[in-house]
Amino acid sequence: MDGILDFSKDLDIGLLDRVVSAMFTSVGPDQKMAAQILPQFQEHPDAWQRVPAILQQSSNSQTKFLALKILDQLISTRWKVLPEDQQQGIRNFIVETIIQQSSEENLPRAEKTYLNKLDMTLIQILKQEWPHRWPSFIPDIVSSSRTSLSICENNMVILRLLSEEIFDYSAEQMTQVKTKNLKNQMCGEFSEVFQLCSEVLEKAQKPSLIKATLETMLKFLNWIPLGYIFETNVIDHLIGRFLEVKEFRNVTLKCLSEIAGLQVVAEYDAKFVVLFNMVMTAINRMIPPSTEIAAVYENSSDADQELVLNLALFLCNFLNTHLRLIETPESKDLLLNAHLYLIKVSQVPEREVFKICLEYWSKLVSELYEELQHLPIST
């Protein structure tokens, strides 16, 4: 087993696979020895140079995961001290491996997991290289997306992961200056990404590609300029193409919930009312008003239960933020219909759903009480 620690000659990939297998599937002395040798292999300063051969030749998924872990450690701790040609070589190798892997249709589960880990390694490189040393990244990923549906689908995953790293997790992992630069760059180049997403949402027929794009859009909606939401066809596509399709309705309703909770300037008020009207019209078709939601909830599928949760989020996000927009005589029926659904959803025996509803009911009752305090006392 300790042959894998001899860095003076080519690595025996088959031996490494056997050591990794012993680590994860064996018991007794073999497992104990593997547990001693593998950390030494991982921690060797030249271990990262073995990664390309491992990823190209290994037949063991766990071995490939180990190789990517070695590479991730290098990127996070020693990237800046590597010669530029080695940085470029690693970057190109990971990109080529991702393209090769994502070109395959119908990947087995283990290969999908491997591809996802490759994507995460690329994100770690991007955090080091983009935008200053890799200014063409966004045009590159948009361009490659148009070569293959399966590549486009994985590129949507990469864009989603990048958005999460910059806008969701950056406070924990990057300096404020670095985070600000990445946010500015992402916003500055977003038009190309948005155009790609719009084309998919308008024309795509492949379900997995549509779903990946919707999941990516969900991560964009809380930071992109409002014009991309309200001055394009995005809302029409979300409601018209996907909201009432069983396979897409949950992620679509999440997108609409994100939009519904946005606090924006008054110029978009009318568009919010139209949005709410369109969504509630669809909800009335999907879940007829006569439905006893609490009664059918426990025997519903996971997806249907998630739909109830997402409905609660949508209603509460909109009503918490934009209630005054529909407190008008013209919207009376819409207002009552929304609250009818919220009453039914509030009766669902699920803690998370109830907490979401309770927050809105508490706010509503508090505001009504305040209004009553300011009414003149009749004599």
Image (spheres, helix red, strand yellow):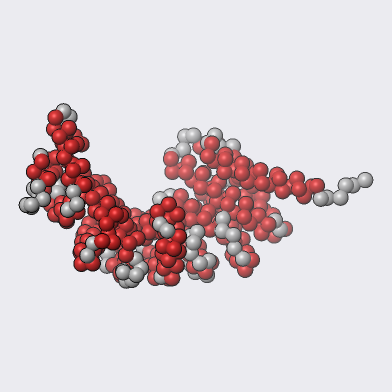
Q: Residue furthest front?
A: 81
Quarter of the image for residue 354 reads: top right
As drawn, 318 above or below 23 = below
Q: Residue furthest left?
A: 9
**Percent from the top left, x then y, of residue 368?**
74, 47
The answer to whether residue 139 is visible is no
As drawn, 7 above or below 23 = below
Q: Is 318 left, or right, of 195 in this rendering? A: right
Residue shown at 34% from the left, 70% from the top:
132
As drawn, 354 above or below 263 = above
Quadrant including the C terminus: top right
Q: Nearer the viewer, residue 243 or 68?
A: 68
All told, the count of numbered labels is 0
Quadrant including the N terminus: top left
Q: Is 334 left, or right, of 10 in this rendering? A: right
The answer to whether residue 41 is visible is yes
Residue shown at 63% from the left, 46% from the top:
360
**Percent from the top left, x then y, of residue 44?**
18, 48
**Percent from the top left, x then y, of residue 3?**
8, 43
Q: Is 193 left, or right, of 41 in this rendering? A: right
Q: Nearer the viewer, residue 145 or 117?
A: 117
Residue shown at 61% from the left, 61% from the top:
273
Q: Residue furthest top?
A: 28
**Percent from the top left, x then y, of residue 145?**
31, 66
Q: Is 274 left, or right, of 250 in this rendering? A: right
Residue shown at 26% from the left, 61% from the top:
81
